[in-house]
Amino acid sequence: MTQEVFGLRYEFVYRHGHLMELFKEGGLEASELSNLQVRMLEANQVPRLLPLDIHEVDSNIRLLYRLSSKRMLSHVLKVEHLSIRLLAKLMYAIVCTLDESKNYMLSEMNFVLKENFIFIGQDWSDVYLTYAPLDIAHDVDESFPSIDALLQKLILHLGEEEQVQLQAWMLTHVAKKSFHAYKEALLKLMDEPILTRETIAAIHSEPIVSPLPELGLPKAHWNRDEAIHIQPKTENPILSKPELIPLSFIPLKQRGRWMTIALIIILFAFLWQQYLAHPGASLLQIIAGITLLLGDVGFVLLLLGRPILSSRMNQNQKSSSNAHNISDPDKEVMRDDSSSDTTDPLDIQHYYQNLSLHTTMLSPSHSNATVLLGKSPKRDQVGPRLEIQVEGVSRTVSIKNEVFTIGRGDSSSRVDYVVEDVGVSRIHAEIVQTSNGFQLRDAGSTNGTFLNEFPLVTYQGYPLKDGDIVRIIRQELTFRL
């Protein structure tokens, strides 16, 4: 990475943990650091700051920032959806950090408010900023231009409708440049987010039900002024059936089976230990009932697996996909709607009558040609891809995006290829397409990524060539071009 900040270059290294290193080509001297700021950082654990270590070798100083269990903001924005509420939480934490820096005698201008130097922990409000304790003179004494520039870049990751409305919100709510005004505006944005056009239209489209006037007791039917409409009685009334939610099971793996058995045994031991400590007839009945219930649950988990609820939408998608497969010409499956009875495969007369349905008519010019009846051979997949062996079955995954992400994934983190092994991070690694080819980067994972059995430094790019093996925990992925 060639980007510089305060005249210093930076790169990512691994030295008993993942680190970000700020250094100078000619060497950073001790006179370029602020002694007061360095002492304050050493004496206090400033919240929401990246932990800093200052290393000096032969009068050459390097600033090392520890990055364990933290994710770079620019990387998070690529794989997670940013909403107005999350943006407000992130900016509120950043503004609070800048405002509180004066309590530690730090300069708010020495914070690096750029996406590659801001890191996030478990939540969007769990922010870690990069602070450079340099003794430099800034052109301005306020960090509000940097805050506005960062806010403008984050707005670009929202939808078009949200971008327009948030731009107008900035002109009216953060016109006054002060930390107090920023915090108040961001708190209101978190509590009362801006309504988009779709939300406003949905609110106005809801029917307005006028409250009924209180007229005392209801009148009898024969005294009411309004006419009563009585629907004719039908012979076979159609009763609305309750919508049933289909239930399916996922078989447990061997590890899950042993964990289930161990958990049930522990619960059994705990329950009967309570009975032995306080024996009684009522307690015996309760513990016996819970024991039977746990036994039933364990039996279902071991025999059938973990239950999941599949929605009606998934069923419709499956039925539509099955209908598509039936009408697929490659499968050469045709149905005769005129007859619902299945024919005997040994009925020769019926076979020759329907022979035109499963044969091909040859033209006179190709009467001696040989026709292959069945599926056409699959073409070999070309282009960048990953080859995976899962339980002896080969699988190929195409790399179609410029940033191809690999990890465990969840509802908030979308990945292109999911690895479900224990120890895999939500966003574990990524394959990035550059002008010089493809690069592999570890996305700040907990257990690391290996390229040809070589451990990668987090966020550092490594060139990929055909045949390279990427290992994530126990999963091996072969890169092909």
Image (cartoon, helix red, strand yellow):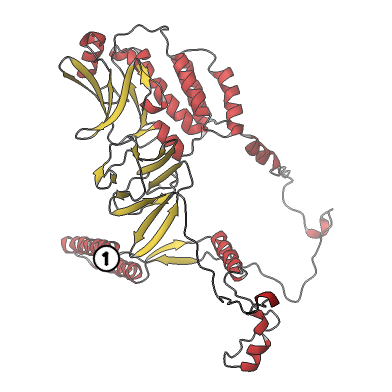
- Name the residue nearer the viewer: 456 or 297: 456
Q: Position of residue 194 (x, y in %)?
A: 58, 30
Quarter of the image for residue 140 reads top left
Residue sitting nearer the eye, 280 or 292: 292
* Spot occupied by residue 243 in the image (x, y as percentages of width and height): 58, 64
Q: Position of residue 336 (x, y in %)?
A: 67, 80
**Residue at 38% across, 16% down:** 99
Establish if 385 lies above or below 327: above
Q: Amino acid at mark 1?
A: Ile
Q: Is residue 299 left or right of residue 275?
A: right
Q: As rendered, which of 278 and 156 lies closer to the eye?
A: 156
Q: Is residue 77 visible?
A: yes
Q: Is residue 245 left or right of residue 451?
A: right
Residue drawn at 58 percent across, 63 percent down? 316
Considering the numbered disc 1 on the image, is that residue within a helix, a strand or a loop?
helix
Give the camera-side residue of 195 and 343.
Answer: 343
Q: In this image, 12 relative to 269: left or right?
A: right
Q: Residues within 10 Å of mark 1 (few under 14, many from 20)?
A: some
Residue occupying the point 67% across, 82% down: 356
Please name the residue that numbered disc 1 is placed on.
Answer: 287
Q: Is residue 195 visible?
A: no
